[in-house]
Amino acid sequence: MPAPTSTAILRNGETRLPSMQSEFSAVVFSGGGCRCFWQAGFWATAAPQLELKPKAIAAVSAGAAFACAAFGGATDAVLASFIRRTRDNPRNFYPGNVLRREAVFPHEPMYRGTILETMDAAVLERLRTAPEIRVLMTRPPRHVHSIPALAMGFAAYGIDRLVRRRVHPTAARSLGFQPMVVTVQSCKTPAELADLIMHSSCMPPLTPAYRRDGRAVIDGALLDAAPADLVDEFDRTLVLLSRRYEELPEHPARLYVQPSEDPPIKMWDYANPDLIQAAYDLGRRDGDTFAAERLAAH
């Protein structure tokens, strides 16, 4: 397959164009850390123009946070809160804190703080009536202790994402890592919602090592950064990626959408507010382009 063009979309096996509101029964918000601000901008412009009303959402890692923001009506608040926090945070690593016995990475309090500030009881109530949001986490093999499990998981992730450059990795699953899926609608409080998102994003040492139901959990993206199989029962799925790939999967029931160019922000860069805004603005431009193309095709 030739490399994708500079436009945001690549169609895979399309044979028909149904009405806009029913075009996509499900949506996937992939992981990608700060690159997922592209998704936020894309959805903020494309969804209202196309009147997209999915029946279910699959999400993982930071994609879970942005799915909750989008369907809870909190995208603008999340953007403003995180930009403010990154503006007040000059670095991503504070080695001097070792001597003070303080955290050397600022990521967990900034991430969790943004969620708790912007996703309050009112947002959670809106999410209860939103389409079901299914959040993916990774469980390490039972027989492996936490530190070796993390090393194995990250090695598998690196092989699939950096060497094989796959949208849907397979290495971690072959090593015995297993999925755990929890719905946003099962969260009873904003604190539980924050825990769920953080568990799906768990990436020590940038975050603490988390446990859920008595077992370790790590970033769901180690299993699949775009977990479309969580919504496989639906006949038409829009998969929102957060980075560009040279080749996208062929699937008759899915449309994979990638940025027109790689978002300028790195996954765990919590110290560059201008790049956060730039990633969001790129998403808005790509969302406008996508919507215009879909409407023109009808």
Image: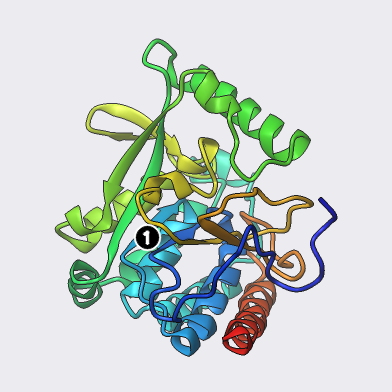
Query: As shown in the figure, which amino acid type bears the numbered disc 1?
Result: Ile
Q: Which residue is mark 1?
A: 57
Badge 1: residue crowd in 10 Å (few <14, some 14–19, many ≥20): many
Q: Would you place residue 186 above or below residue 218 in this image?
A: below
Q: Can you tell which quarter of the image residue 20 is in?
A: bottom left
> Does residue 150 appear in the picture of this structure?
no
Residue at 47% over, 76% down: 18
Left or right placement of residue 131 versus residue 272 in this view: left
SS class of the residue under badge 1?
strand
Percent coordinates x, y for residue 75 in the rendering: 43, 78
Would you place residue 284 above or below residue 166 in this image?
below
Q: How many marks?
A: 1
Q: Residue furthest left?
A: 188
Q: Quadrant of residue 109?
A: bottom left
Query: Which residue is at the front of the view, 8 or 298?
Result: 298
> Is 135 located above or below residue 156 in the figure?
below
Left or right? Give the position of 88 relative to 231: right
* Residue located 49% across and 40% down the image: 101
Q: Is residue 245 left or right of residue 232?
A: right
Q: Nearer the viewer, residue 136 or 15?
A: 15
Q: Position of residue 256 (x, y in %)?
A: 60, 60
Residue 141, placed above or below residue 296: above
- Please say whether residue 113 is visible from this viewpoint: yes
Q: Nearer the viewer, residue 100 or 7?
A: 7
Looking at the image, the residue that sits furthest to the top is 143
Q: Residue furthest right?
A: 2
Residue 298 lies in quadrant: bottom right
Image color mode = rainbow
Task: Please give the name of the residue rendered at 44% of the width and 75% of the height, measured from the top-left corner.
Answer: 78
Percent of width and height locating residue 102 = 48, 45
**Residue 231 percent coordinates (x, y):** 38, 51
Q: Kindly give the residue lying farthest to the front in the view shown.
A: 15
